[in-house]
Amino acid sequence: MNFDRRAFLAGCGTFSLTACTGTTSSIPSESTDDLPEDLRPIQNSDFSEWLKSFQPRARRAGITPSTLDAALSDVGFIPGVIARDRNQIQNRRTLEDYLSITVSDERLAKGRTAFTRHAKTLAAIETQYGVDAKVVTAIWGIESQFGEKRGQVPVISSTATLAFDGRRGDFYERQLIAALRILERGDTTPRQLVGSWAGAMGHTQFIPTSYQSFAVDFNGDGRRDIWGHDPTDALASAASYLARNGWRSGLKWGAEAGSGRLTGRGLQPQNGGPRFTVTRNFDVIKTYNNSDFYAIGVGHLADRIGGASPLQGTFPPDANGLTKTDRISIQRGLVSRGYDIGTIDGVIGTKSKAAISDFQRRQGLPVTGTATRNVLAALR
Protein backbone atom coordinates (compact mmCIF):
# COMPACT_ATOMS: atom_id res chain seq x y z
CA MET A 1 0.00 0.00 0.00
CA ASN A 2 2.90 2.36 0.63
CA PHE A 3 3.97 1.98 -2.99
CA ASP A 4 0.50 2.92 -4.17
CA ARG A 5 0.44 6.06 -2.09
CA ARG A 6 3.95 7.13 -3.12
CA ALA A 7 3.19 6.55 -6.79
CA PHE A 8 0.01 8.57 -6.45
CA LEU A 9 1.57 11.48 -4.62
CA ALA A 10 4.53 11.66 -6.95
CA GLY A 11 2.02 12.33 -9.69
CA CYS A 12 -0.02 14.89 -7.79
CA GLY A 13 2.55 17.36 -6.50
CA THR A 14 0.09 19.15 -4.30
CA PHE A 15 0.81 21.02 -1.05
CA SER A 16 -2.04 20.80 0.39
CA LEU A 17 -9.99 24.43 10.16
CA THR A 18 -13.10 23.20 11.00
CA ALA A 19 -14.62 23.02 14.43
CA CYS A 20 -15.56 19.62 15.77
CA THR A 21 -19.31 20.01 15.59
CA GLY A 22 -20.15 16.62 17.02
CA THR A 23 -22.02 15.68 13.86
CA THR A 24 -21.16 12.56 11.89
CA SER A 25 -22.72 13.81 8.69
CA SER A 26 -20.44 13.53 5.65
CA ILE A 27 -21.10 17.02 4.30
CA PRO A 28 -18.57 18.09 1.65
CA SER A 29 -16.33 20.94 2.73
CA GLU A 30 -17.00 22.93 -0.41
CA SER A 31 -20.05 23.12 -2.65
CA THR A 32 -19.63 21.33 -5.96
CA ASP A 33 -21.34 24.34 -7.50
CA ASP A 34 -18.00 26.11 -7.06
CA LEU A 35 -16.11 23.61 -9.21
CA PRO A 36 -14.34 25.02 -12.26
CA GLU A 37 -16.24 24.13 -15.42
CA ASP A 38 -13.58 21.68 -16.60
CA LEU A 39 -13.81 19.69 -13.36
CA ARG A 40 -17.51 18.97 -13.73
CA PRO A 41 -18.50 15.55 -15.11
CA ILE A 42 -19.79 15.53 -18.69
CA GLN A 43 -21.02 12.90 -21.09
CA ASN A 44 -18.45 11.22 -23.35
CA SER A 45 -19.33 8.30 -25.62
CA ASP A 46 -15.92 6.62 -25.46
CA PHE A 47 -15.92 6.93 -21.67
CA SER A 48 -19.41 5.41 -21.53
CA GLU A 49 -18.21 2.43 -23.56
CA TRP A 50 -15.27 2.00 -21.21
CA LEU A 51 -17.62 2.03 -18.22
CA LYS A 52 -19.62 -0.82 -19.77
CA SER A 53 -16.46 -2.88 -20.15
CA PHE A 54 -15.40 -2.04 -16.59
CA GLN A 55 -18.55 -3.18 -14.81
CA PRO A 56 -17.96 -6.95 -15.22
CA ARG A 57 -14.49 -6.47 -13.70
CA ALA A 58 -16.01 -4.57 -10.79
CA ARG A 59 -18.56 -7.34 -10.21
CA ARG A 60 -15.79 -9.94 -10.25
CA ALA A 61 -14.03 -7.81 -7.60
CA GLY A 62 -17.10 -8.19 -5.38
CA ILE A 63 -18.99 -4.96 -6.07
CA THR A 64 -22.74 -5.63 -6.08
CA PRO A 65 -25.00 -4.51 -8.96
CA SER A 66 -26.93 -2.22 -6.60
CA THR A 67 -23.75 -0.38 -5.57
CA LEU A 68 -22.67 -0.08 -9.20
CA ASP A 69 -26.06 1.29 -10.21
CA ALA A 70 -26.01 3.90 -7.44
CA ALA A 71 -22.37 4.87 -7.98
CA LEU A 72 -22.46 5.10 -11.76
CA SER A 73 -25.86 6.73 -12.23
CA ASP A 74 -24.35 10.23 -12.27
CA VAL A 75 -20.78 9.38 -13.22
CA GLY A 76 -19.17 11.35 -16.03
CA PHE A 77 -15.95 12.12 -17.82
CA ILE A 78 -13.99 15.03 -16.29
CA PRO A 79 -11.77 16.72 -18.92
CA GLY A 80 -9.94 18.87 -16.37
CA VAL A 81 -8.68 15.79 -14.57
CA ILE A 82 -6.94 14.59 -17.74
CA ALA A 83 -5.51 18.05 -18.40
CA ARG A 84 -4.10 18.29 -14.88
CA ASP A 85 -2.70 14.78 -14.98
CA ARG A 86 -0.90 15.40 -18.27
CA ASN A 87 0.34 18.89 -17.54
CA GLN A 88 1.67 18.63 -14.02
CA ILE A 89 4.54 21.02 -13.46
CA GLN A 90 7.51 19.48 -11.74
CA ASN A 91 7.92 21.02 -8.33
CA ARG A 92 11.10 23.09 -8.47
CA ARG A 93 10.53 25.03 -5.29
CA THR A 94 13.40 25.35 -2.85
CA LEU A 95 13.04 24.13 0.71
CA GLU A 96 12.90 27.78 1.78
CA ASP A 97 9.88 28.38 -0.48
CA TYR A 98 8.25 25.12 0.57
CA LEU A 99 8.52 25.96 4.26
CA SER A 100 7.32 29.52 3.59
CA ILE A 101 4.11 27.98 2.28
CA THR A 102 3.63 25.00 4.58
CA VAL A 103 4.73 26.71 7.79
CA SER A 104 3.40 30.18 7.03
CA ASP A 105 2.30 32.45 9.86
CA GLU A 106 -1.32 31.91 8.84
CA ARG A 107 -1.07 28.12 8.77
CA LEU A 108 0.81 28.10 12.06
CA ALA A 109 -1.84 30.23 13.77
CA LYS A 110 -4.61 27.98 12.45
CA GLY A 111 -2.65 24.92 13.50
CA ARG A 112 -2.27 26.08 17.07
CA THR A 113 -5.97 26.92 17.21
CA ALA A 114 -6.91 23.51 15.78
CA PHE A 115 -4.54 21.71 18.14
CA THR A 116 -6.11 23.43 21.15
CA ARG A 117 -9.68 22.98 19.93
CA HIS A 118 -9.24 19.23 19.35
CA ALA A 119 -6.82 18.61 22.23
CA LYS A 120 -8.93 15.92 23.91
CA THR A 121 -9.48 13.99 20.69
CA LEU A 122 -5.84 14.28 19.65
CA ALA A 123 -4.66 13.11 23.06
CA ALA A 124 -6.90 10.06 22.83
CA ILE A 125 -5.55 9.31 19.34
CA GLU A 126 -1.97 9.62 20.57
CA THR A 127 -2.71 7.27 23.44
CA GLN A 128 -4.26 4.72 21.08
CA TYR A 129 -1.64 4.78 18.31
CA GLY A 130 1.48 6.20 19.95
CA VAL A 131 1.89 8.85 17.22
CA ASP A 132 2.74 12.41 18.27
CA ALA A 133 -0.51 14.41 18.16
CA LYS A 134 1.37 17.46 16.85
CA VAL A 135 2.61 15.44 13.85
CA VAL A 136 -0.95 14.29 13.13
CA THR A 137 -2.11 17.91 13.33
CA ALA A 138 0.69 19.02 11.00
CA ILE A 139 -0.27 16.41 8.40
CA TRP A 140 -3.86 17.67 8.63
CA GLY A 141 -2.64 21.21 8.07
CA ILE A 142 -0.47 20.43 5.07
CA GLU A 143 -2.92 18.03 3.43
CA SER A 144 -6.11 20.10 3.68
CA GLN A 145 -5.31 23.30 5.59
CA PHE A 146 -7.02 21.85 8.68
CA GLY A 147 -10.06 20.76 6.75
CA GLU A 148 -10.62 23.95 4.76
CA LYS A 149 -9.66 22.32 1.44
CA ARG A 150 -10.89 18.75 1.48
CA GLY A 151 -11.71 18.72 -2.23
CA GLN A 152 -15.04 18.71 -4.03
CA VAL A 153 -14.46 16.65 -7.19
CA PRO A 154 -16.62 13.48 -7.38
CA VAL A 155 -14.19 10.63 -6.67
CA ILE A 156 -15.99 7.97 -8.72
CA SER A 157 -15.91 10.23 -11.78
CA SER A 158 -12.30 11.37 -11.26
CA THR A 159 -10.85 7.90 -10.70
CA ALA A 160 -12.95 6.45 -13.53
CA THR A 161 -11.75 9.21 -15.86
CA LEU A 162 -8.11 8.51 -15.02
CA ALA A 163 -8.60 4.76 -15.33
CA PHE A 164 -10.22 5.27 -18.74
CA ASP A 165 -7.43 7.61 -19.89
CA GLY A 166 -4.93 4.81 -19.41
CA ARG A 167 -1.73 6.68 -18.55
CA ARG A 168 -1.91 5.10 -15.10
CA GLY A 169 -4.92 2.97 -15.92
CA ASP A 170 -4.22 -0.05 -13.70
CA PHE A 171 -3.44 2.14 -10.70
CA TYR A 172 -6.60 4.20 -11.06
CA GLU A 173 -8.81 1.22 -11.74
CA ARG A 174 -7.65 -0.10 -8.36
CA GLN A 175 -8.56 3.28 -6.85
CA LEU A 176 -11.98 3.19 -8.52
CA ILE A 177 -12.76 -0.30 -7.21
CA ALA A 178 -11.56 0.71 -3.74
CA ALA A 179 -13.84 3.78 -3.91
CA LEU A 180 -16.76 1.54 -4.85
CA ARG A 181 -15.99 -0.62 -1.84
CA ILE A 182 -16.29 2.46 0.35
CA LEU A 183 -19.83 2.89 -0.96
CA GLU A 184 -20.52 -0.84 -0.65
CA ARG A 185 -19.62 -0.69 3.05
CA GLY A 186 -21.82 2.37 3.61
CA ASP A 187 -19.13 4.72 4.93
CA THR A 188 -20.53 7.53 2.76
CA THR A 189 -22.73 8.14 -0.30
CA PRO A 190 -21.84 8.77 -3.97
CA ARG A 191 -22.75 12.44 -3.65
CA GLN A 192 -20.58 12.89 -0.59
CA LEU A 193 -17.64 10.87 -1.91
CA VAL A 194 -15.59 13.85 -3.06
CA GLY A 195 -11.93 14.77 -3.06
CA SER A 196 -9.10 16.28 -5.07
CA TRP A 197 -8.98 16.06 -8.86
CA ALA A 198 -6.84 12.92 -8.54
CA GLY A 199 -8.98 11.14 -5.94
CA ALA A 200 -7.36 12.06 -2.61
CA MET A 201 -10.09 12.41 -0.02
CA GLY A 202 -11.02 14.12 3.18
CA HIS A 203 -9.19 15.97 5.93
CA THR A 204 -6.02 13.90 5.57
CA GLN A 205 -6.26 13.23 1.82
CA PHE A 206 -6.33 9.44 1.68
CA ILE A 207 -6.50 7.76 -1.70
CA PRO A 208 -9.15 4.99 -1.78
CA THR A 209 -6.70 2.07 -1.39
CA SER A 210 -5.04 3.73 1.59
CA TYR A 211 -8.47 4.37 3.05
CA GLN A 212 -9.33 0.69 2.74
CA SER A 213 -6.09 -0.36 4.47
CA PHE A 214 -5.71 2.26 7.19
CA ALA A 215 -8.90 4.24 7.86
CA VAL A 216 -10.54 3.71 11.25
CA ASP A 217 -13.86 4.45 12.93
CA PHE A 218 -12.45 6.22 15.98
CA ASN A 219 -15.66 7.86 17.18
CA GLY A 220 -17.53 4.55 17.09
CA ASP A 221 -20.47 5.56 14.90
CA GLY A 222 -20.05 2.58 12.58
CA ARG A 223 -18.55 4.54 9.67
CA ARG A 224 -15.01 5.58 8.83
CA ASP A 225 -15.92 9.16 7.96
CA ILE A 226 -12.94 11.22 6.76
CA TRP A 227 -15.08 13.65 4.73
CA GLY A 228 -17.40 15.29 7.27
CA HIS A 229 -16.99 18.36 9.43
CA ASP A 230 -15.86 16.24 12.38
CA PRO A 231 -12.18 15.39 11.68
CA THR A 232 -11.94 12.68 14.36
CA ASP A 233 -11.88 9.62 12.08
CA ALA A 234 -9.54 11.31 9.60
CA LEU A 235 -7.02 12.29 12.28
CA ALA A 236 -7.11 8.82 13.81
CA SER A 237 -6.73 7.30 10.35
CA ALA A 238 -3.57 9.33 9.73
CA ALA A 239 -2.20 8.12 13.07
CA SER A 240 -3.18 4.57 12.16
CA TYR A 241 -1.32 4.93 8.87
CA LEU A 242 1.89 6.13 10.55
CA ALA A 243 1.69 3.57 13.36
CA ARG A 244 1.30 0.67 10.97
CA ASN A 245 4.18 1.96 8.88
CA GLY A 246 6.58 1.79 11.80
CA TRP A 247 6.23 4.96 13.88
CA ARG A 248 8.26 4.68 17.09
CA SER A 249 6.46 6.25 20.03
CA GLY A 250 8.42 8.87 21.95
CA LEU A 251 11.01 9.39 19.19
CA LYS A 252 11.24 12.82 17.55
CA TRP A 253 11.08 13.03 13.77
CA GLY A 254 14.32 15.02 13.81
CA ALA A 255 15.48 18.55 14.51
CA GLU A 256 17.60 21.31 13.11
CA ALA A 257 21.21 20.25 13.60
CA GLY A 258 22.71 21.83 16.68
CA SER A 259 19.34 22.54 18.30
CA GLY A 260 19.72 19.82 20.90
CA ARG A 261 20.88 16.28 21.52
CA LEU A 262 19.37 13.93 18.96
CA THR A 263 20.84 10.74 17.60
CA GLY A 264 20.18 10.23 13.91
CA ARG A 265 21.56 10.88 10.45
CA GLY A 266 22.36 14.25 8.94
CA LEU A 267 20.36 15.85 6.14
CA GLN A 268 21.48 18.89 4.15
CA PRO A 269 19.29 20.48 1.44
CA GLN A 270 21.03 20.51 -1.94
CA ASN A 271 20.83 24.28 -2.28
CA GLY A 272 22.24 24.91 1.19
CA GLY A 273 20.53 26.32 4.22
CA PRO A 274 19.72 24.78 7.60
CA ARG A 275 20.96 21.27 8.30
CA PHE A 276 18.83 18.64 10.02
CA THR A 277 19.33 15.53 12.06
CA VAL A 278 16.56 13.01 11.32
CA THR A 279 15.43 9.70 12.80
CA ARG A 280 13.56 6.66 11.56
CA ASN A 281 10.27 8.51 12.21
CA PHE A 282 11.30 10.95 9.47
CA ASP A 283 11.22 7.99 7.06
CA VAL A 284 7.82 6.97 8.40
CA ILE A 285 6.45 10.43 7.55
CA LYS A 286 7.86 9.92 4.05
CA THR A 287 5.62 6.87 3.58
CA TYR A 288 2.76 9.40 3.60
CA ASN A 289 4.47 11.44 0.87
CA ASN A 290 7.87 10.30 -0.38
CA SER A 291 9.57 13.69 -0.20
CA ASP A 292 12.25 15.06 2.12
CA PHE A 293 10.64 18.50 1.82
CA TYR A 294 7.28 17.09 2.90
CA ALA A 295 8.71 15.28 5.92
CA ILE A 296 10.68 18.35 7.01
CA GLY A 297 7.56 20.48 6.52
CA VAL A 298 5.43 18.16 8.64
CA GLY A 299 8.07 17.89 11.34
CA HIS A 300 8.81 21.60 11.51
CA LEU A 301 5.13 22.58 11.48
CA ALA A 302 4.52 20.07 14.29
CA ASP A 303 7.37 21.56 16.30
CA ARG A 304 6.11 25.12 15.76
CA ILE A 305 2.56 24.12 16.75
CA GLY A 306 4.12 22.86 19.95
CA GLY A 307 5.79 26.22 20.61
CA ALA A 308 9.25 25.72 19.07
CA SER A 309 11.16 28.65 17.56
CA PRO A 310 11.65 29.24 13.83
CA LEU A 311 14.67 27.64 12.16
CA GLN A 312 17.91 29.31 13.18
CA GLY A 313 19.90 28.51 10.04
CA THR A 314 19.70 30.85 7.06
CA PHE A 315 19.06 30.02 3.43
CA PRO A 316 21.40 31.34 0.73
CA PRO A 317 20.24 33.91 -1.88
CA ASP A 318 18.29 32.45 -4.80
CA ALA A 319 19.55 32.08 -8.36
CA ASN A 320 18.88 35.79 -8.96
CA GLY A 321 20.82 36.90 -5.89
CA LEU A 322 17.74 37.68 -3.79
CA THR A 323 17.13 36.71 -0.19
CA LYS A 324 13.66 36.00 1.17
CA THR A 325 13.69 39.49 2.66
CA ASP A 326 14.40 40.92 -0.81
CA ARG A 327 11.55 38.94 -2.37
CA ILE A 328 9.17 40.12 0.34
CA SER A 329 10.25 43.71 -0.38
CA ILE A 330 9.41 43.19 -4.05
CA GLN A 331 5.98 41.82 -3.16
CA ARG A 332 5.28 44.70 -0.79
CA GLY A 333 6.37 47.18 -3.45
CA LEU A 334 4.00 45.61 -5.94
CA VAL A 335 1.11 45.66 -3.45
CA SER A 336 1.77 49.35 -2.74
CA ARG A 337 1.29 49.95 -6.47
CA GLY A 338 -2.08 48.22 -6.48
CA TYR A 339 -1.10 44.72 -7.63
CA ASP A 340 -2.74 41.60 -6.23
CA ILE A 341 0.08 39.16 -5.56
CA GLY A 342 -1.72 36.97 -3.05
CA THR A 343 0.10 36.30 0.20
CA ILE A 344 3.23 38.31 0.96
CA ASP A 345 5.54 35.44 1.84
CA GLY A 346 8.64 35.77 -0.32
CA VAL A 347 7.47 33.01 -2.66
CA ILE A 348 7.35 34.28 -6.24
CA GLY A 349 4.33 32.45 -7.58
CA THR A 350 2.01 32.97 -10.54
CA LYS A 351 0.41 36.19 -9.27
CA SER A 352 3.76 37.73 -8.33
CA LYS A 353 5.21 36.87 -11.75
CA ALA A 354 2.22 38.39 -13.53
CA ALA A 355 2.52 41.57 -11.43
CA ILE A 356 6.27 41.80 -12.09
CA SER A 357 5.66 41.42 -15.82
CA ASP A 358 3.11 44.23 -15.84
CA PHE A 359 5.36 46.45 -13.71
CA GLN A 360 8.31 45.83 -16.05
CA ARG A 361 6.17 46.67 -19.05
CA ARG A 362 5.00 49.94 -17.53
CA GLN A 363 8.56 50.85 -16.55
CA GLY A 364 9.95 50.12 -20.00
CA LEU A 365 12.05 47.24 -18.66
CA PRO A 366 12.55 43.89 -20.37
CA VAL A 367 9.49 41.83 -19.56
CA THR A 368 10.59 38.59 -17.88
CA GLY A 369 8.27 38.17 -14.90
CA THR A 370 11.36 37.32 -12.88
CA ALA A 371 12.17 38.80 -9.50
CA THR A 372 15.63 40.33 -9.84
CA ARG A 373 17.74 42.99 -8.16
CA ASN A 374 16.79 45.39 -10.98
CA VAL A 375 13.09 44.93 -10.18
CA LEU A 376 13.84 45.41 -6.49
CA ALA A 377 15.72 48.64 -7.22
CA ALA A 378 12.94 49.93 -9.51
CA LEU A 379 10.32 49.36 -6.82
CA ARG A 380 12.19 51.31 -4.16
Image (tube, grey):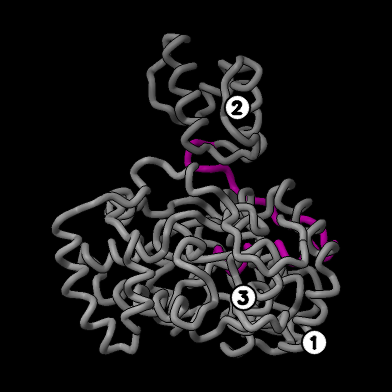
209 and 332: which is toward the camera: 209
For marks 1 and 2, the one nearer the N-term is 1
Left or right for 220, reference 226: right
Quadrant assignment, res 344 = top right
The quarter holding residue 298 reads: bottom right
Count neighbours of disc 1 (C-alpha within 10 A) and say few if under 14, some if 14 to 19, many if 20 or more.
few
Q: Nearer the viewer, mark 3 or mark 2?
A: 2
* Residue visible at 64% across and 83% down in the picture: 222
Residue depicted at x 51% and y 56%: 151
Distance of label 3 from label 1 (alpha carbons): 30 Å
Q: Amino acid at mark 1?
A: Thr
Residue to which mark 2 is pinned = 330
Q: Which residues are magenta?
A: 293-321
Choose mark 1 or mark 2, whichever is in front: 1
Gap between marks 3 and 2 measured at Cα = 34 Å
Magenta-drawn stretch contains 308:
yes
* 82 on left or right of 192: left
Taking the magenta stretch, the answer to whether it contains residue 134 is: no
Q: Is residue 31 above or below residue 199?
A: above
- Circle 2: element type: helix
Task: Indicate the position of residue 265 as horizontal and vertical percent values.
Answer: 62, 80
Q: CA distance from mark 1 to mark 2?
A: 47 Å
Amino acid, disc 2: Ile
Q: Can residue 182 be seen in this snapshot? A: yes
Q: Quadrant of the N terminus?
A: bottom left
Q: Mark 3 or mark 2: name the one nearer the start of the chain.
A: 3
The label number, if any, that marks residue 127 in the structure image: 1
